[in-house]
Amino acid sequence: MEVTQTKAEGLSRTFAVKVPVSELQAKLDARIEEIRPQMRLKGFRPGKVPAAHVRKMYGRDLMGEVIDKLVNETNQKALEENSLRPAGQPNVDMQADIEQVVTGQADLSYEMNVDVMPEFTPVDIATLTINRPVAEIADEQIDEALKRIAEQNMKYEPRAEGEASQDGDAVIVDFVGKIDGEVFDGGSAEQQSVVLGANRFIPGFEEQLLGVKAGDEKDLNVSFPEDYPAANLAGKAAVFETKIHEVRAPQTPEINEEFATGLGLESLEQLRGLVKDQLQNEHNVASRSKAKRDLLDKLDAAHDFDLPPGMVNQEFDQIWQQLQREMDAGRVSDAEKTKPEEELRAEYRKIAERRVRLGLVLAEIGRLADVRISEAEVNQALIREARQYPGQEREVVQFFQKNAGAMAQLRAPIYEDKVVDHILDTAKVEEKTVTREELFKEDEE
């Protein structure tokens, strides 16, 4: 076996590998002898299948196994002997005719291309000063949150007899929908509650119920939107014959002891305490997020080293594909829509470079500090992921367990958060009191 480094440019390395036919055949013979005792073939006693017969029947497949194993072992050996840390999976470019190699007519020869990790010393995190904004929980904020809870638990009480419906009311109605005088499927209901202004029905339906009274009968003339999900109804004019049973006005419950106990709590004081805890948790998350952003900015500014091109390209491709999806969905700013593609690519490549640089810095800081994540933490993350797909939890768990790449993506944010926590515990963190609005204000960048 010959392994020769042929190129070393920046962080990219190329090795030429050659394995003669004789060595391949020797490894194939060894593999045949390894499996022959366990083989059971018709016409032969158990474990007594001749090597020549095994080679004839399974030689091609076995040689494929030998080559795959040899390539992996050779790549690993080349990295270890040259004290290289790979920045991703090596890329193998086969030089020989693989058909001839498998059939024992040619040497195995290929090129192994790999990006290696840069050598750098991370900044002493004890010298960093991180800014962390914090905000107090004011009574007014608790009152506002309680008001929102009350509105979410709004009740509807019947209006006085003869009183007309207003925006926000719930109208209890029977309706029958017709197109060209014919009743269509799914267009009828009885005792249906329609909240006026909620926009849960097709355009024009709720608006024409404004001003109706209990006992009224009214025809609603509407048109289904052109993009309506049911193709047989899209764009068509319809008439809904309605009968109004009741008009109910919204009543926001008073925030008192009765309201709290109605939610299953012991007292209004307990409800206020729970609301305060929830607000505090929101503040803590936002505060840590801002501190993390400041930390990452300082780490980015403190490091300047060559980046593995393969990692940058992979990160850029992911970002660019996401941008394309956002553009197709119309979810990008006007400024980005009008920018030349070359300018956009340059901007997003800088973002990719920042992400790769910070990823490498955080990984090295974590390695030096011996930061680790437990299997329990990974399992908790896996359970949270699986719960996002009700009814498919088992399949999701099995997918991650069988997919090393997916599992690595699951572990990565857990590890990053633990490294960030380690840095925040070690660095000097200066807290600055701000308002809730300032705490939750999105960075202009």
Image (cartoon, rainbow, N blue to C red):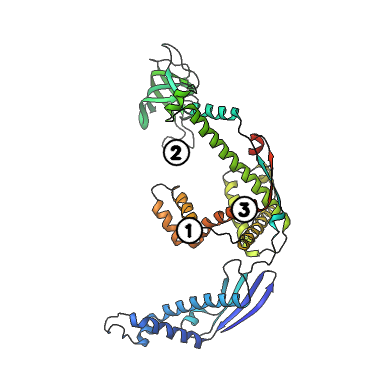
Q: Position of residue 184 (x, y in %)?
A: 36, 31
Q: What is the number of the mark on residue 420?
A: 3
Could you tell me how many numbered marks the image carries? 3
Give the CA distance from mark 2 to mark 3.
46 Å
Residue drawn at x 61%, y 66% as measured from the top left: 87
Q: Nearer the viewer, residue 116 or 135?
A: 135
Residue 163 seen by the camera: yes
Quarter-wise, where is residue 143 in the image? top right
Which residue type does callout 3 highlight? Val
Q: Is residue 162 above or below residue 320?
A: above
Secondary structure of the residue carrying tag 3 is: helix
> Are the residues at dot 1 and dot 3 in contact (C-beta closer than 8 Å)?
no
User: How would you rate the neighbour count of disc 2 (Cα within 10 Å): few for under 14, some for 14-19, many for 20 or more?
Assistant: few
Which residue type does callout 1 highlight? Glu
Q: Position of residue 377 (x, y in %)?
A: 49, 54
Secondary structure of the residue carrying tag 2 is: loop
Indicate which disc, 1 or 3, sits on the residue closer to the N terminus: 1
Secondary structure of the residue carrying tag 1 is: helix
Q: What is the number of the mark on residue 375?
A: 1
Q: Is residue 55 above or below residue 300?
A: below
Q: Position of residue 326 (x, y in %)?
A: 58, 47
Q: Nearer the viewer, residue 176 or 26?
A: 26
Residue drawn at x 49%, y 62% as measured from the top left: 404
Question: Mark 2 = which residue?
Answer: 229
